[in-house]
Image (cartoon, rainbow, N blue to C red):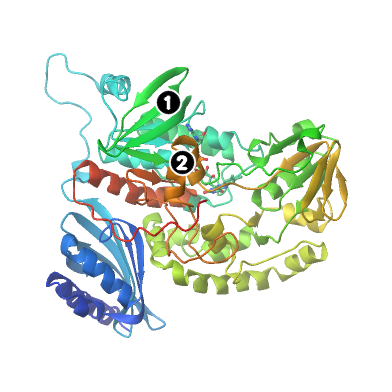
Amino acid sequence: MLDTTANAEVQGVLDTFGAALERGDIDAAVACFQDDCYWRDLVTFTWNIHTSEGKAAIGGMLRSQLAATKPSGWTIAEGETASEDGGVTTAWIEFETGVARGYGLIRLIGGKIWTLLTTMVELKGHEEHKGFTRPLGAKHGAGKHRLTWKEEREAEARDLGYTKQPYVVIVGGGQGGIALGARLRQLGVPSIIIEKNERPGDSWRNRYKSLCLHDPVWYDHLPYIKFPENWPVFAPKDKVGDWLEMYTKVMELNYWSKTTCKSAKYDEQSGEWTIVVDRDGQEVVLKPKQLVLATGMSGKANLPTYPGMETFKGDQHHSSRHPGPDAYRGKKAVVIGSNNSAHDICAALWENDVDVTMVQRSSTHIVKSDTLMDIGLGALYSEQAVRSGMTTEKADLIFASLPYKILHEFQIPLYEKMREVDAEFYAGLEKAGFWLDWGADGSGLFMKYLRRGSGYYIDVGASQLIIDGKIKLAHGNVKEIVPDGVVLQDGTKLEADVIVYATGYGSMNGWAADLIGKDVADKVGKCWGLGSDTPKDPGPWVGEQRNMWKPTKQEALWFHGGNLHQSRHYSQFLSLQLKARMEGLDTPVYGVPETHHLG
Ligand SMILES: Cc1cc2nc3c(=O)[nH]c(=O)nc-3n(C[C@H](O)[C@H](O)[C@H](O)COP(=O)(O)OP(=O)(O)OC[C@H]3O[C@@H](n4cnc5c(N)ncnc54)[C@H](O)[C@@H]3O)c2cc1C
């Protein structure tokens, strides 16, 4: 189909759809969708992150939200052209609501909407000051006793949290807290980031010394400041730490390092939190209206309890506390677990002449980094993608536009291809006795990440060490820890001077239990996962990541985090939700799911 025909087709649908919405004719609006259809909304209609699946759900959402949303101006986005491929017509779109400007992606099949993504870009009258409206910086003219930028910053740092209260407190100053803090700063939302570590970036620096990012640079940019063109594809963790520290400074974040959040309590009457923090030895009480826990999706260590642990004579620690191999040269190590951290740690131990055994308790999904970059991410996040005009922002939106309900259908063929390309590699792993899986439905790594946040290794070399028998492999669950090693359920004894528990991380509402109380943690329930009814992601289906970046069952409590891509992308929508509340806009939330799982 010629682009002009595709344009006309899309604009025709948008005109009909827009007109139906404007006159409140929900049946006519729903009739623009085909039977198998999805509308994913990031904040514009639902003040939530929500996917309506099917015509009935779309009708239900509109009946609840349309009157308050007042959408208008549906059009193909400026400078964009619709395209047609394999019977699907796709176009970038723009629209407005009563309070916001929106951007999205529409896919049509046979002239009807198959998928619709609507996302909030900015709140009218509360736009970020950029481009033509960027700050002047200098103060031209003259005025007595006027303050310099530095003096103003110092005054802000002195007053905020003491004589002036922030609107938002973000607990956790890793990449999640930092990215959100940067967006809130640009939106003029007074915020403080609380971080117990010494310096921004320490959450990466403190991890095992061999760690490099598993995701490539094109996937990892923070908002506002992109990594330079000569930044490594897979940045070493200390380099990421330094970048975050630099970013925190130049983005003018109010970042309280060496500060631990001790407790938080919400007063429903006043709509205010009382947050007690220890700032470098001094107790400070903060009274924000909103509390964001950005305390780490991979932050709450899952340390198993095995009989006899207290009798072990050597070192034993969770992978998040593993110092690296140096102290263990010439010794025996047992690493319990077989996902990313376990593989990275085993490889570094082997490189440093440690006799290392990995204990595989259940099957693991393995994908070679090069193959994943090529087949899994290449079209959106790669140098080739950049060269062909793909921007980070567009890549994020294309990714976001594929509804979770059907995302696995797009993923399965990619992983089938990876399996084919690396058939010899997988045969080698199986021959070495490694238990492999491809996710419950063969949909591979990304679905495992979204569903359970674990269960995989992106291979950067450790698998070959397993194939070659250089990293030894044992199977099964641990029966007990004895003074000089680990005994497995089948009676196998593995001698050890050091045991590393690479046993993963708990749900983020565990942080809420620690800081606010078990009642609140139980009220909001489990964070992460989609309800896919696959291992570690129990049903029922909820259609979006539980509790992340959106309203929870606890008023004024939010969770933020995830990988660098998610920290970047979803901080936009969380910051706009917070800004709208600060400005007192009406934010009728649609579709907060019931809590089904406690954690
Ligand atoms: C080994 C490993 C490798 C990973 N590799 C990648 C990768 O390649 N790419 C990628 O995108 N992601 C990766 N991740 C996943 C994820 O991106 C990281 O875990 C990332 O650090 C998450 O950022 P965050 O800001 O959500 O949490 P964190 O970085 O964990 O930050 C949370 C912060 O909260 C602070 N905190 C917690 N409680 C309190 C309190 N009470 N008071 C004050 N401060 C508190 C902590 O000190 C911490 O600094 C990896 C994770 C692990 C464990």
Horizontal and vertical percent for residue 233? 55, 49
Residue visible at 34% across and 51% down? Answer: 551
Q: Is residue 78 visible?
A: no
Residue 189 appears left or right of 425:
left
SS type, badge 1: strand
Q: Nearer the viewer, residue 69 or 126?
A: 69
* Picture coordinates of residue 7, whole percent (x, y): 25, 77
Mark 1, ligand 1, within 8 Å: the answer is yes
Residue position for label 1: 277
Give the residue at the far top of this rendering: 145
Is residue 26 depicted above or below 120 in this figure? below
In the foreground, 108 or 436? 436
Q: How many marks?
A: 2
Which quadrant does the N terminus fall into? bottom left
Label 2 – label 1 distance at C-alpha: 15 Å
Per the rendering, the mark at residue 47 is: none
Q: Is residue 135 above or below residue 376?
A: above
Q: Is residue 119 visible?
A: yes
Residue 592, percent across and down?
A: 35, 58
* Label 2 environment density (alpha carbons within 10 Å; few <14, some 14–19, many ≥20): many
Q: Quadrant of residue 594?
A: bottom left
* Image height of 308 relative to 113, above or below: above
Position of 482 with respect to 555 (left or right) is right
Q: Tell me the quarter of the picture where residue 497 sits.
A: top right
Q: Amino acid at mark 2?
A: Ala
Residue 437 in the image: state x and y as whole percent. 68, 66
Q: Earlier in the sequence, mark 2 or mark 1?
A: 1
Q: Residues within 10 Å of mark 1 (few under 14, many from 20)?
A: many
**Disc assigned to residue 512:** 2
